[in-house]
Amino acid sequence: MSAPEYDACHVMAPGETLHAQHEEYPLFHALIYGDPTRCAKLSKRLACALRSLPLRLEFHYEHDTLAALEAGIGADPTLVLDGAIFLEGLPSAEEIAERFGQLLIARNSKN
């Protein structure tokens, strides 16, 4: 019996990195602001949508409303990627994949 494949479609734990084993992939730092339940939904959606893209994404969460307001966050949930607001609300998996695909293209064109 072979070992089960890693299931990317799960709620990512704080500090967990999607595709951690691929050190050759660029690393992005995700901070998800919002209610724990909505953050979990976005986390799982991100993990599912990005499972085939060549990137690593380290997950962190902030559930404190005051901290979110101080950071200029206006939607629940909000994904801040490397210090900048990247996604707000619960976008579709297709939208997530498209946005990150564009990010990778832009990053590669700079190198």
Image (spheres, helix red, strand yellow):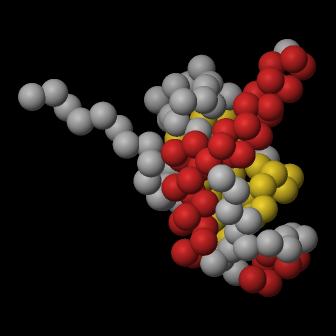
Q: How many numbered marks appear? A: 0
Residue 91 position by quadrant: bottom right
The residue furthest bottom is 66
Quadrant housing the N terminus: top left
Asked where in the image residue 73 lies, by quadrant, the reply is: bottom right
Q: Residue at x 81, y 19 (%)?
A: 108
Question: Residue placed at 67% from the left, 39% from the top?
Answer: 97
**Rendered-image quadrant of the C terminus:** top right
Please give left or right for residue 86 compared with residue 33 in the image: right
The spot of residue 86 in percent (x, y) is 81, 51
* Residue 103 placement (x, y as % from top left): 80, 33
In percent of the image, x 89 and y 19: which residue is there? 110
Q: In the rendered image of this protein, does residue 105 appear above or below residue 65? A: above
The vertical placement of 53 against 71, above or below, is above
Residue 14 locus on image (x, y percent)? 53, 59
Left or right, 20 with reference to 35: left
Left or right: 83 in relation to 29: right
Q: Residue furthest left?
A: 1
Closest to the observer, 12 or 51 = 51
Residue at the image point whose x is 79% and y is 47% from the top? 82
Residue 50 seen in the figure: yes
Do we see residue 58 in this rendering?
no
Side of 94 where 37 appears, left or right: left
